[in-house]
Image: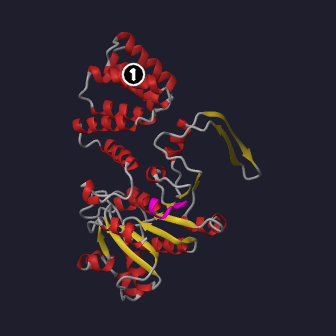
Amino acid sequence: MSVESLLTEAMAKHRAGDLDAAETLYQNILSIDPGDPDALNLLGVLSLQSVKLDEAAQLIRKAIVIDPTIAEYHYNLGEVLRHKGDNNAAMDSYRKSLEIDPQLGIAQNQLDQLASLSEISPIKPEVTGRPLKRNEVIQAVIDRIGAKTYLEVGIDRGENFVSIRADRKYGVDPVSTNDLINKLLNNCGISYFQYASVGSHNTIEINLNATNQLPNDMPANKSSEFYYETSDQYFARHAPLLFKDTPIDVAFLDGLHTYQQTYVDVTNTLDYISGGGIILMHDCNPPTEASAYPAPSWEEAAGMNIPGWDGRWCGDVWKSIVRLRTTRDDLRVFVLDCDFGIGVVYRGEPEGRLDYAIPEIEKMTYADLQKEREKILNLKPQEYLYEFLQKEL
């Protein structure tokens, strides 16, 4: 069998999760050609998955020496270095991968995340010279008010959630974050795992013992809890008990991208927010008409053949800002012009309340937003975050 055929088979085994078979095939390739860079790189990735970090770094570095022009090799080395806790070296590897392939979005995401973790909040955006990301805004608020309890509705793959530093973190999403769970399982030194059927309904109970070893890119917290259910179910079933004595200090709402549900999520959160607590809302400033199209989910929006659709989707969350600024005389509400618009809601004197009837808000379209975007959103430049944190909190 040729090296090319062996590599194809090894990659198929690797993708299927049969790591032992893939490792054997990669080793067979290297016995034929010790300098095959693809086999070295992929065997390094496999070693990373098996938490053999020194071995993984050695193999991928060999691949880079043989062919330094492959962006994925540098990205994979960055992943190994990140797991080893050497964030500066990891960032250098991500930058190298982006020099070779500027479109390698996953490398840019990891680079941005590590950069944000190394920064001290708050940072004046005009100094950074780049748009602020949601995790930076959230962390800056948490750090400024000394927040202990953080709630995130709509954790998706968990990328934002795991980057946040707070004592107690609660994540809510009706869809299980399998990649996040796998990441935890792959990095926590599991010493015992058991699952068994329980009760008449044949439910599954899982017991897991693991060493105290978090992935290096996950900030240590006193506790992090995930609830795989809708936000309505969460607030009805768990919030009254969880937040009775320790209310929410900072919440980030990024769930169902509809005006109605976002407004409900805000009002539910307000029932459990601390006196000086702050609610942050994502997707409040859609950049295009297509991105603001109402839909029950991203998948359904993507399937609607919306003119101008490019994959960005905020829904009509912005209307919840309009409603809050219209109906609540006890809340200060504004939107930061960064990362698709981050709404800020906290108890305080309103700034320029709006005057719409609820039926009018229901009928508003993107054209209405375009006409008076700054007015109806109380839109602030991202630089205002610095002033807000320093002077208003």
Q: Nearer the viewer, residue 212 or 236?
A: 212
**Which region of the structure is painted magenta?**
143-151
Name the one closer to the observer, 263 or 189.
189
Which residue is rendered at x = 50% and y = 61% of the image? 146
Q: Nearer the viewer, residue 309 or 161?
A: 161
User: As displayed, is residue 23 above or below residue 16?
Assistant: above
Write down the residue under mark 1. Answer: 58
Residue at the location (52% across, 55% down)? 166
Quadrant in the picture for residue 323: bottom left
Q: Which SS class for mark 1?
A: helix
Which quarter shows the C terminus?
A: bottom left
User: 80 left or right of 274?
Assistant: left
Residue closest to the eye, 117 or 292: 117
Q: Residue at 43%, 18% (x, y): give it.
A: 25
Q: Few, some or many C-alpha atoms within 10 Å of disc 1 (few <14, some 14-19, many ≥20)? A: some
Q: Position of residue 127 (x, y in %)?
A: 26, 56
Q: Confirm whether residue 186 shows in the render.
A: yes
Query: Is residue 219 rendered to the left or right of residue 287?
Result: right
Q: Is residue 147 magenta?
A: yes
Compared to 182, does 150 lie above or below? below
Is 129 within the magenta? no
Location of residue 297 in the rendering, given as x and y in whole percent from the top left corner: 42, 62
- Could you tell me the amino acid type at mark 1? Gln
State the image coordinates of residue 156 (x, y, percent, origin top left).
46, 54
Q: Say which residue appears at 30% left-offset and 60% top-offset.
A: 124
Residue 187 drawn at (x, y percent): 53, 36
